Every structure is written in structure tokens, then in C-alpha cells.
Amino acid sequence: MVVAETPRANLPPAVQRQLQTAQDLFIRRWGEMGQTWGINRTMAEIHALLYVVAEPLCTDDVMERLHISRGNASMSLRALCDWGIVRRLHKLGERREFFESLSDVWDMFSLITAERKRREMDPVLETIKQCRRMLDEQSIGKQAARGREVQLTRQRLAGMEEFMEVTNKIFQQFIGNARSGLTRVVRVLLKAF
Amino acid sequence: MVVAETPRANLPPAVQRQLQTAQDLFIRRWGEMGQTWGINRTMAEIHALLYVVAEPLCTDDVMERLHISRGNASMSLRALCDWGIVRRLHKLGERREFFESLSDVWDMFSLITAERKRREMDPVLETIKQCRRMLDEQSIGKQAARGREVQLTRQRLAGMEEFMEVTNKIFQQFIGNARSGLTRVVRVLLKAF
DNA sequence: CCATTCTTTCAGTATTTACTGAAAGATGGA
DNA sequence: TCCATCTTTCAGTAAATACTGAAAGAATGG
């Protein structure tokens, strides 16, 4: 099937090149940052590409632009979709799938935050509670629960639990509110301080 | 030199064991979480150990408890000290050094946040600004700057820059305020929502 | 139904990251 | 000064992680 050319005035080659250079710079930095936050470089790069280009790309576009294999592209794109920050998109009259990034950074932040809280903070909180139960009077007796070392550890666990409960509450404000929630948070904060 | 035994009533062995089990559970979970946030497992574990035990430990204590080599312990402890969440401690009459974790979770959070902002967010923000400059009228001319693709990319970069500027401001509130700042933040937020 | 086009999977491999242990370097006491 | 004790460094190695490419699996059109 023959597809009509996108009807758009093309940029002069020099500008095209400059655009790509700027995009690549952003993509590279974004990938580097991802790594230090526990997100693999390629995934971060793909996301950066889709975000900065601001147009739907297909798998081959991504492979070509980032010099990665088909398998890698496929798996990384799926993971991004699972996170919810990239969406699949079917173009009419096209057989292959396209992918686009969410456009609102605040939405992306909300999604990622919610997911990481669920995956990583909640289990830790659960463990802390479990540890505390292992050291309460019921488990080890009144006498032992008063032992110096036990007390110390229990205090520390309690401190951490409190911290995580509070940060969880803050996250709740962000999650689901996305942009409007966040800007409101910021406005409130900047006024209060 | 002979060192006097620590003058403290020891816990019954069963309690001792239970205490250690609870601590180990916490340590393990903390290490796992660290990994997913880009902090290596051992470093997170050492920190968890020092935090939860709530008493200064020497290098050999750490090595023994976590089954790691001297080199690893030395390097990881130094890194933790660099982050500022662990402190070196000289006991009088002791030749070797001891290490202790900060006790206040809020302080630790502030330190880590400030450092990660400096190391990881600031460079990205700088890059985004640079990318935008590469695509402004001065660089590529009025005509080209109006091209559709250029416009799209510029909008995306602007969106990301705004986001990072705002989150930076939020961080500023936390940093330096630590506990008091955070609890205030929370109080303000919970009231406002 | 087959042929074509596109997508996913995964065993094998490459790359990166983390860890060890031994040797060199400090520090402090005698 | 030397000796003993403790710390750091780093080359070599082990472990974890990421990536590839080919093969199998869907989906679509004819």
C-alpha cells in the first residue's frame, strides 16, 4: 500500500541538523540521569526521544535514531507503556504501531511516583511494621522489650516508619492531582515559606 | 591494650537472636530498595545496619555482620560519609575508627535530596537550557524557528524546564529545613487539601 | 487459506557494575 | 626509630545487567 507523504514544508537541512543535535543532546543527558535513578539508560533515552520529538514514532524510527536492536526497542517500549508514560497509537491505514509520550510532565511525574511508591515504598513500610511486631512485648516479653538494644532498634524503626508514612501522604497529594494538584501544592508552599 | 567489656546486661540468647533477625530483615529490604533507586545494595545495607543498630560499629563489625570484604566495607563506608549520612567517630582509647548513622531520618533525606539535586538535576536543567538556546531565533533564524518541528521540540523542552524549576523550588524548602521544614510542609499541605 | 508485514520472545553474549584480597599506606605507641 | 594495628587502594575477577539477532508468533489483506 502506498502512503501519501506527510504534507509539510520541510526544514532546511542545516536547521534539520541543528534540531537533531539539540534533541540528541537532551536524549543523552536524560539517559544518563535515568541511570543514576535506577532506570536503564536505553529506556530513558527512548522516552526522551518520544517526548522531545513530540510526534508519534514507530519501532523502526526508534531503532534507527538510537542505534538499538529490534528486541531492545520492543521490550523497552512495552515497559514504558506499562509505566503509562508512553502510549501505543494506531494510525489509520498503517499496519505498524506508533508510540507517543505523554505531553504533560506533571502527569508523567504523577504516574511514576505512584508506581514507585507502590512497587518500592509500600513493601518497605510493610517490612518495617513486621520488624516492629517481632520486637514488641507480645513477641519477646515485657522484660526483654525493655532491653537497651531492643529499645534502640525499636526507636529507629519507629522513626523510619513515621517518615515513610508522612512522605506517603505527600505523594497522595501529587498522585491523581497531577498538574493542577502540583501547581497548587507549589503555590501553597511558596506562600507559606 | 586490653579493653574493658562494655558494662551492660546482655540480652537472653533467644531475644538476641530475634533482635538480629528483625534487624537483618530490615537491612535486606533496605538494600533491595536502594538498588531500585540507583544506590548499590551493599551501601544501602551498611547504612541500614548502622541506622537500625543505633550504635557505632567498626569496620570489622560491618564486615562480619554483612559478610563483605574489607575493601568493600572501607569504600562503601567512605561513600556514606561523603554523602554525610554516616559519621566517623573516634572512641577514646580505641585505635580503630567507628561509624554511626545519623539518627534523624529527615536530616538524612535532606542531605540526600540536596546532593542528588546538585549532582543529577542541575546538569540536566543546564542541558535543557542549552538545547533551547540552540533552537532560538538567534541561533537558527526567525524563519526556521517557526518551523513546525522546531516549535514542537521547543515546547517540550520548555515544559520540562518549567517542571524542573518548580521541583527545585520545592526541594529548596526541604533542604536546610530538614525535620521542622518537612513537618511544616506536611501540615500546610494537609490543611490545604 | 497463504503470504506479507509487523511484534514479541529469549538463549546467548557483551557490557557494566560490584567485590575481593593482597599490598601499600597511615597512624600511634613504645 | 621500629613495630603493631588499622585503613585505603586497586588490579583482577565475579556477578549482575543490558542488548542482540534470529526464530516464533500475531495480525491483516488478498
Image (tube, coloured by chain):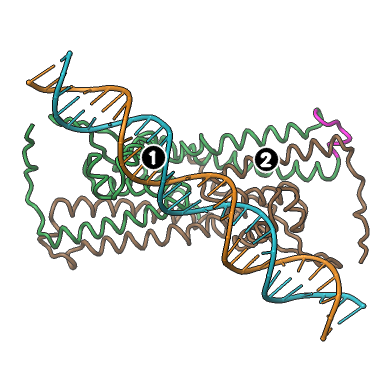
Chain colours: A brown, B green, C orange, D cyan
Cβ–Cβ under 8 Å for marks 1 and 2 = no
Q: Name the element at disc 2.
A: helix
Q: Does residue B104 appear anywhere in the picture?
A: no
What is the quadrant of the N terminus of chain A in the image?
A: bottom right
The 10 Å Cα crowd at callout 2, few under 14, some 14 to 19, many 20 or more, is many
Residue named by callout 1 = B178
Residue A83: name its quadrant: bottom right
- The vertical placement of B4 against C25, above or below, is below
Residue B51 placement (x, y as % from top left) = 29, 46
* Residue at 73% over, 53% down: A62
State the residue at coordinates (43%, 57%): A121
Q: Which chain does the numbered disc 1 sit on?
A: B
What residue is pinned by disc 2?
A26
Image point (6%, 44%), residue name? B7
Q: Which residues are magenta?
A: B139-146
Q: Position of residue A192 (x, y in %)?
A: 48, 41
